[in-house]
Amino acid sequence: GAVVSQHPSWVICKSGTSVKIECRSLDFQATTMFWYRQFPKQSLMLMATSNEGSKATYEQGVEKDKFLINHASLTLSTLTVTSAHPEDSSFYICSARDSGGADEQYFGPGTRLTVT
Amino acid sequence: QKEVEQNSGPLSVPEGAIASLNCTYSDRVSQSFFWYRQYSGKSPELIMSIYSNGDKEDGRFTAQLNKASQYVSLLIRDSQPSDSATYLCAVNNNYKLSFGAGTTVTVRA
């Protein structure tokens, strides 16, 4: 149980284009999902908290107009990186909190984004 | 002061030995604590959660929590080469996880 999927697993895009990443909880409902970014040899940095049916809450320093988050159902959250630049190249990981469980968060496999 | 601090490592242990990982946190009201394992290039995998003071054992892993000292640890017994990874300590604050920088463990065969 507690499986979270992400799609795509990796993506290469050109500077100035937008990329959408999907995060799905496969066997549980998640009213709350989280989006992280991780640069090489660094720890995870929380970007935003995604709440089903409401606006996402962004961490300080994260541009909400650049990183669009939609959490339209209890099993799906999407992150769209708009007008991507090379400095947005990173490992993007989502996690989901089981609405019916304790406080554990389960991570998706991550999406490696390269902007050329 | 960082919210969650871990012993920096890297930690190298021989196969079969015990690996000991330490973590301290700053927010006294935190109630839930987690250890994640992250292999290079992969996402974190939850290996232990602990909510009450004392020890919690799961297979070769034992987590220890001392809320008075704001300290949580992870012991890996009978370390195997497959345990070589970065271990992340995470503390729950209002459903958001604060992560330590991680401790990289290498188990020598």
Image: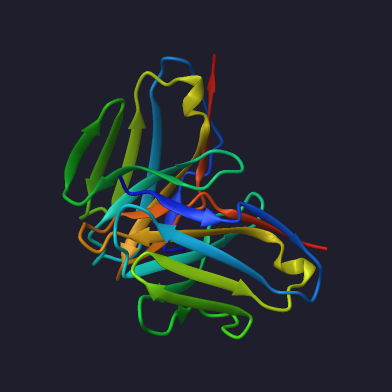
Can I make out residue B25 in this image? no
Residue A14 vertical placement versus A11 (above, below): below
Identity of the residue drawn at 37% across and 84% down: A54
Question: Residue A98's image quarter?
Answer: bottom left
Identity of the residue drawn at 42% across and 75% down: A71
x, y percentage for residue B58? 25, 32
x, y percentage for residue B72? 30, 47
Q: Which corner quadrant holds the C terminus of chain B?
A: top right
Can I make out residue A105 in this image? yes
x, y percentage for residue A34? 44, 66
Identity of the residue drawn at 21% across and 57% down: A101
* Of residues A116 and B60, the one drawn nearer to the viewer in this rendering: A116
User: In the displayed structure, does residue B83 sit left or right of residue B91?
Assistant: right
Q: How many marks?
A: 0
> How did the renderer colour the structure?
rainbow
Identity of the residue drawn at 67% across and 51% down: A40
User: In the displayed structure, does residue A64 sit left or right of residue B44?
Assistant: right
* Of residues A36 and A71, the one drawn nearer to the viewer in this rendering: A71
x, y percentage for residue B36? 41, 45
User: In the displayed structure, does residue B26 sit left or right of residue B14?
Assistant: left
* Of residues A14 and B38, the one drawn nearer to the viewer in this rendering: A14
Residue B65 vertical placement versus A19 (above, below): above
Question: Residue A88's image quarter?
Answer: bottom right
Residue B98 vertical placement versus A106 (above, below): below
